[in-house]
């Protein structure tokens, strides 16, 4: 066949490649100063805990850990999550990564042209998934004033309704947002719920970084404010290890039922052995022990990055002060183009993700996302100095 | 919210629950004689090999085995598959289960209303996936004569074209088909390729049982006959263990590229640690050793089932003689209703899957699928005797 283009579905025309994942293909992240990616530090993977738990699961669960499993996930893991987060079992679905959680929510909710409102900037993998279903993705900028914040969402909703569009959901990463690192205050979360209720929308709350708080106090989840309209997505990637590809969904049973049937045809069930390992990692105390060590490590790295930025960045450059998570967001002087600058930086040996990739409606050309979890403290220091010197020109 | 129905996507109206997976929820398969399901025998899972290999991977690969991985899969695993099957690396994509392979092919190829031709009966999980994208699924019955076989596919294609429909692909399970257990002869495969070429369709070749041959000789894959129009799906579920949720796709790079971008937004990458385990299982010789033992076990079980059917089934009942795989297919006298009979059988302690579930266009009410891999030889004997006595009434 000369070409397959006549065979591809309409959705494929809206697929777009992740520039982040493509960076990974292009360069060896270990050979450069990489502030790109959202990789946890390999130092946080407790290899000996994994070895011991895996051996335990083989002894204790045996062959059942290698057989097909229930579509909603292994009972022990759902129980462990239920105990940790106080969510009833029938509201818990295990996913094969929290990216799958985003994708399956979009699949069951959005037809082509349906409107999804999201913070702007927002997580790139979510934008990829939304667009892949040809949803109409509209960004709403953050405002520190809750009234103006809610009004901006209401205005976007009104606009969509006036165009005859169907509103489906608001996508939010309220804790240590990707890419901004910022956390949505409680009042903002309440107002978001009000707007969603008013316009008959759901909220997809993406919370992969929630457990990684380095200062301040936890803000209640959007799910806890309104568990009936909120689908909450969790992830083992940042509290255990991404290589297991496991996450979870909390949601109303009617919504989970659609996700359940969808997941049957997507991949039957999540990885079974990995789920038993995660269950023991969680209920046996390894998770809390490991999380405490990870948080100390990341807090120190964040502080080093903040300090180095303070010491080295030229005037006119500003950045967020994240209370947790893996990223901070840099704003450069108006006119600076971080997409064009990327090749210069990479040639000099330093990588970041251009902020504009995270903007659903373009914009943010003078921004960049910096990750502080992946590299060692020393390399963060050196990398920021290098980046600052390049920016200073 | 009172109801979510106004929020669900159009696709969800075409989701249907797997009656097979729902049987698993309803009964404890270990408490009854279960010929339902497609579970491999737990006796074929080499637990000590798994334990040793997992520990080796932790020693040898270390933290990298728990980090995010490449979307196309871990290089070592793609290399091992390339070496085993003689397919170049750039034509190999790892999937998070071969069910995902089916789903992602449908996603990138079929718009609502597009036509997929499939054998009738066919694999239920594939029908679920096809319908979930609102494809127009049309069944074509098997014919032992290659001319009539090809003609039936051509006729179905012509019919679709005459209705103004777009043809997308032919779905085939050529080796030890699910549910029939039958194998497509070489000439039939060649003719299928001709028909697909003539009508500009692709072929999705689903081959999860291919390595489980108990007699006769291998028939070349459809992929080997025409690697440019065929997407070949493989699975680790039956040659290693289903709990890893790993499979693979062989296909033309242009098609794999679409699958690659789709997989980025589906779940970023397959489970990483599990892929390293599978790579070592394959390249270290465990797979061949284990496969040889599995085949001896399944061959014996198949023979016991065939023998018990011969001894105990009343006149008017016939069944297929599979040369491999996990299933055989029973045809009962016209008028027998295996869907209605199911509750009677289950009450008496024996489960099967009603054949009609596998027919895309209804039909097959007098058929049932029997699995011979899951239960022990003794329980197969007892179960078939019980089933035969129930059928005899």
Image (cartoon, coloured by chain):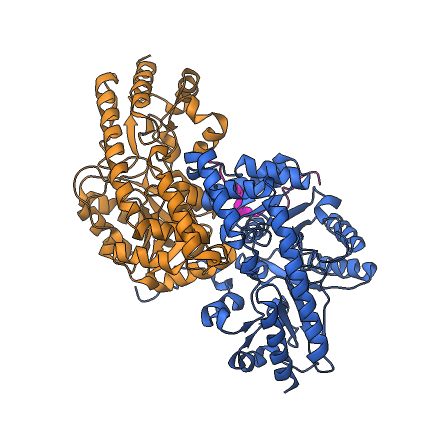
Chain colours: A orange, B blue
How far across and down, in percent of the image, does residue B16 sit? 51, 65
Height in image: B317 above or below B204? below
Q: Main secondary structure of the magenta part?
A: loop
Stretch of the chain drawn in magenta: A1-18
Q: Residue at x 32, y 32 (%)?
A: A373
Height in image: B317 above or below B122? below
- Quarter-of-image position of residue A42: top left
Q: Quadrant of the N terminus of chain B?
A: bottom left
How far across and down, in percent of the image, does residue A283 sit? 30, 53
Q: Left or right: B9 with respect to B120?
A: left
- Quarter-of-image position of residue A371: top left
How far across and down, in percent of the image, does residue B149 sit? 78, 60
- Of residues A123 and A193, the one nearer the viewer is A123
Q: Left or right: A166 with respect to A323?
A: right
- Of residues A348 and B38, the one nearer the viewer is B38
How far across and down, in percent of the image, does residue B176 sit? 69, 59
- The answer to whether residue A159 shows anywhere in this view is no
Membership of A217 in magenta stretch: no
Height in image: A330 above or below A125? above
Query: Which residue reaches farthest top?
Result: A393
Q: Residue at x 27, y 36 (%)?
A: A181
- The answer to whether residue A124 shows anywhere in this view is yes
Membership of A3 in magenta stretch: yes
Q: Residue at x 44, y 45 (%)?
A: A129
Q: How many marks?
A: 0
Query: Which residue reaches farthest bottom?
Result: B393
Q: Residue at x 63, y 51 (%)?
A: B291
- Quarter-of-image position of residue B252: top right
């Amino acid at each position: 066949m000369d070409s397959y283009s006549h065979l591809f579905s309409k959705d494929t025309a809206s697929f777009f490649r992740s520039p982040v994942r493509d960076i990974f293909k292009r360069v060896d992240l270990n050979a450069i100063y990489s502030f790109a990616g959202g990789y946890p530090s390999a130092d946080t993977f407790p290899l000996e805990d994994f070895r011991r738990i895996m051996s335990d699961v083989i002894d204790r669960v045996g062959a059942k850990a290698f057989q097909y499993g229930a579509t909603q996930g292994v009972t022990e893991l759902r129980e462990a999550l239920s105990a940790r987060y106080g969510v009833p079992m029938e509201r818990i679905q295990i996913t094969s990564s929290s990216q799958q959680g985003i994708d399956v929510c979009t699949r069951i909710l959005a037809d082509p042209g349906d409107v999804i409102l999201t913070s702007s900037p927002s997580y790139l993998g979510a934008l990829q998934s939304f667009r892949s279903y040809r949803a109409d993705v509209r960004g709403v900028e953050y405002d520190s004033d809750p009234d103006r914040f809610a009004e901006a969402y209401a205005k976007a909703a009104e606009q969509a309704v006036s165009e005859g569009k169907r509103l489906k959901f608001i996508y939010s990463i309220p804790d240590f947002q990707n890419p901004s690192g910022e956390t949505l205050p409680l009042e903002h979360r309440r107002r978001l719920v009000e707007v969603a209720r008013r316009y008959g929308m759901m909220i997809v709350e993406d919370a992969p970084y929630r457990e990684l708080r380095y200062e301040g106090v936890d803000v209640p989840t959007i799910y806890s404010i309104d568990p009936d309209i909120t689908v909450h997505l969790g992830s083992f990637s940042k509290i255990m290890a991404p290589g297991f590809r496991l996450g979870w969904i909390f949601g109303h049973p009617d919504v989970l039922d659609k996700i359940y049937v969808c997941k049957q045809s997507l991949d039957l069930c999540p990885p079974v052995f990995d789920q038993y390992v995660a269950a023991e990692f969680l209920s046996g105390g390894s998770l809390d022990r490991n999380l405490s060590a990870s948080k100390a490590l990341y807090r120190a790295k964040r502080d080093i990055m903040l300090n180095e930025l303070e010491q080295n960045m030229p005037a006119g450059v500003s950045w967020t002060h994240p209370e947790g998570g893996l990223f901070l967001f840099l704003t450069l002087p108006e006119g600076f183009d971080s997409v064009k600058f990327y090749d210069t930086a990479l040639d000099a040996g330093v990588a970041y993700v251009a902020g504009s990739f995270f903007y659903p409606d373009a914009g943010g050309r003078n921004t960049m996302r910096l990750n502080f979890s992946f590299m060692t403290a020393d390399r963060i220091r050196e990398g920021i100095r290098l980046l600052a010197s390049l920016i200073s020109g």
